[in-house]
């Protein structure tokens, strides 16, 4: 279908351009994710939910520093938490 192909192409180029503009920097991903999640404490409590961000780094072999685009990671985590509250 031509409309599907056009939509796919637009999405592909948008994703490609977003990745090209990404700014990767060394980040303690566990601490950064925990910090982002802490902003949801009131919303989670209001919804009667609790969130655990305990990560045992040795079990998952998570390096101390990972190269991530902090803005993109924050958007991803905020979106996941927002959806968790919205659909719970």
Image (cartoon, rainbow, N blue to C red):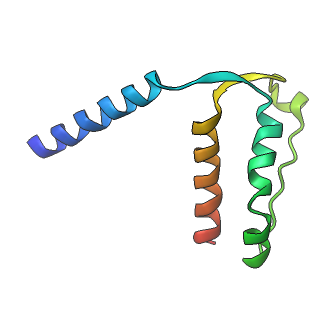
Q: Residue farthest to the left?
A: 2
Please say whether residue 51 is visible from this viewpoint.
yes
Q: Where is 26 relative to 88, above or below?
A: above
Q: Position of residue 86 (x, y in %)?
A: 59, 70
Task: Where is residue 32? Give x, y as percent.
Answer: 78, 39
Q: Which sits in the foreground, 68 or 3?
A: 68
At 31% from the left and 38% from the top, the residue drawn is 11
The C terminus - image quarter = bottom right
Q: Going 72% across and 70% down the picture, which residue do you hit?
A: 43
The answer to whether residue 16 is above or below residue 47 is above
Instruction: Point out residue 35 in the picture as x, y percentages from the top left corner.
Output: 80, 47
The answer to whether residue 1 is visible is: no
Q: How many marks?
A: 0
- Residue 42: image x %, image y %? 78, 70
Going 65% across and 58% down the picture, which residue do you hit? 81
- Of 52 and 32, the residue lying toward us: 32
* Res. 63 image quadrant: top right
Residue at point 80%, 60% (across, down): 51
Left/right of residue 17 with respect to residue 56 in the rendered view: left
Q: Where is residue 18, by image quadrant?
A: top left
On screen, residue 14 versus residue 61, left or right, reads left
Quadrant where the N terminus is found in the figure = top left
Quarter occupied by residue 69: top right
In the displayed structure image, the side of residue 86 where residue 55 appears, left or right:
right
Compared to residue 87, the image places residue 63 above or below, namely above
């Amino acid at each position: 279908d031509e409309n599907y192909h056009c939509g796919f192409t637009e999405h592909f180029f948008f994703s490609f351009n977003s990745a090209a503009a990404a700014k990767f920097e060394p980040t303690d991903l566990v601490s950064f994710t925990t910090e982002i999640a802490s902003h949801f404490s009131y919303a989670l409590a209001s919804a009667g939910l609790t969130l655990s961000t305990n990560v045992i780094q040795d079990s998952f072999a998570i390096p101390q520093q990972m190269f991530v685009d902090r803005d993109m990671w924050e958007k991803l985590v905020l979106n996941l938490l927002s959806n968790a509250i919205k659909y719970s």
